[in-house]
Amino acid sequence: MGSIERRVEALERSFDNCRTAPVEDSEERRRIIEELEARRPEFEERMAREEAEGNFTRRRALEDLEEQIKRRIRTREDGF
C-alpha cells in the first residue's frame, strides 16, 4: 500500500502545483497516470480472480483508498 500512497501524494502535489502554476500537466503526473493506466488490466484481472476465490481484500483496500482520497479532497475544498 505504501507505493500507492506515494503515487497518490505525488498526484496531489502535481494538482497543488496546478493551482498556483499554469494549467499544464507536470511530467511526473503524466508519467504516473500512464503507468497506472497501463497496469489497470492487470489490476482488474487480479482483483476479479481473487474475488472469484472469495478474497475481497483488494476490493476493500481500493474502496478504503477511494474514501481517503475523497476525504482529502473535501478537506482541501473546505480550506483546511
Image (cartoon, rainbow, N blue to C red):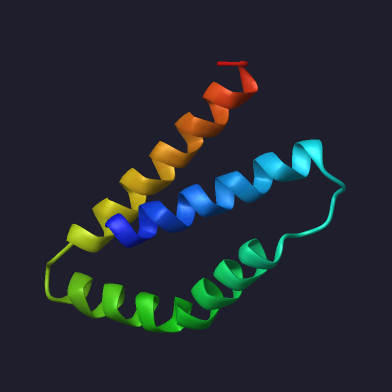
Q: Position of residue 49 (x, y in %)?
A: 23, 80
Whether 39 is drawn above or below 33: the answer is: below
Q: Is residue 1 left or right of residue 78?
A: left
Name the residue at 69% across, 67% down: 27
Which of 42 and 7 lies nearest the eye of the viewer?
A: 7
Where is the C terminus found, in terms of image quarters?
Answer: top right
Q: Is residue 32 left or right of residue 15?
A: left
Whether 46 is drawn above or below 24: the answer is: below
Which of 76 and 49 lies nearest the eye of the viewer?
A: 76
Which of 78 and 6 lies nearest the eye of the viewer?
A: 6
Q: Position of residue 34 (x, y in %)?
A: 60, 76
Which of 10 and 36 lies nearest the eye of the viewer?
A: 10
Q: Is residue 50 left or right of residue 36?
A: left
Name the residue at 13% across, 66% down: 55
Please, which residue is most extreme toward the right here? 22
Name the residue at 34% across, 61% down: 3
Q: Position of residue 5 (x, y in %)?
A: 37, 52
Name the residue at 37% across, 47% down: 65
Where is the N terminus found, in terms of image quarters?
Answer: bottom left
- Give the mark count: 0
Whether 75 is drawn above or below 22: the answer is: above
Quarter-of-image position of residue 50:
bottom left
